[in-house]
Amino acid sequence: MVKKTGNPHVAHPQNYRFILDQPKKCEEQKPFVVVIVPVAPQNIKARNAIRTTWGSEELVRDKLVLVFFLLGSESPNETLQEQLQSESQEYEDLLQSNFLDSYRNLTIKTLVMMDWLSRNCPQASFGAKVDADVLLNMKNLLHMLVSLKSLQRNYITGLIMYGNIVLRDPSSKFYVPHNVYPKSRFPPYPLGMCYIFSMDLPEKILHISWHIKPIFIEDAYLGMCLKRLGIAPKKPADSGQFVVRPPQRFDRCYYSGRIAILTYSQTQLISYWMDFHSAQRPC
């Protein structure tokens, strides 16, 4: 059962089951990278924005990329569920589990993602978690991964946060009490907007998560799991390729050189992607 919203702990993914699933797609298509985008069930605009932009790029640098959207469930809403059923039949890219989709349950969503990847996509080389408001540059992502050359193990990268302070103010959105996490700082972790990992990690993270009480701050919890596993997140060759606060004015040269950029709206995501994929030179 889903715990009450106020509880700092969350349940384990084995408590949940999939309502909409694509269990055979990785096995059939043998992707190099599997990208999972957590998104709210009702947010079809975000899904369509991605489907018409970076999510449409299936073959990049001769490597196959699969993109799936991961959803939880709303409180009983038959109309929405029927719409999701039909969307799933049309696009074959929805993964929906029966946990309650909410901000406080993002860690459940992350563990459900790891559970699904470990069971269905072990043959892929990499997985990636990308937020729905992120503009992903597939070409640059694949360039980074291909340049690693050898097969990676225990590899996770993104915009790495070091020494983030645990907030103890009960009025804060990110409040974590001492009895939940006693240390004053979180271990290093990749920021949740976009992180990329070798496909041996999902099973290891799942296994260790049985021994670490989950907290609702999903990326910090991931860092807790990695620390217990003795795995340090790796800084990318260029941390500047992961952008949380992009410049106000659009600059094609700047954007065409990044991997992941946080955007403010679906309109912005689409227009920026179309601009640096136009026939004109990148700069």
Image: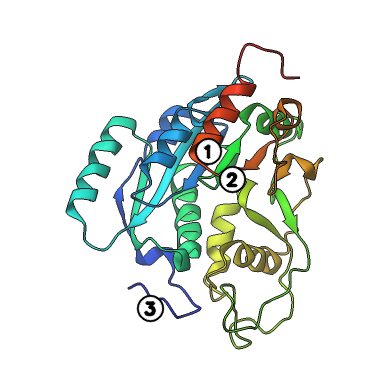
Between residue 177 and residue 224, name the one nearer to us: 177
Query: Up-down: is 187 above or below 37?
Result: below
- The kind of secondary structure element at disc 3 is loop
Check the image and name the residue furthest to the right: 237
Q: Residue furthest top?
A: 279
Q: Look at the numbered disc 2 and give the secondary structure of its residue.
A: loop
Q: Give left or right: position of 186 versus 277.
A: right
- Looking at the rendered structure, the secondary structure element under dot 1 is strand
- Residue closer to the observer: 134 or 183: 134
Proximity of marks 3 and 2: CB atoms separated by less than 8 Å: no
Residues 169 and 209: in front is: 169
The tag on residue 199 is 2
Say which quarter of the image contains residue 150.
top right
- What residue is at 38 percent from the left and 51 percent from the top? 71
Residue under pointer 1: 34
Q: Residue furthest bottom?
A: 179
Residue 279 image offset from top left, x and y in percent: 62, 11
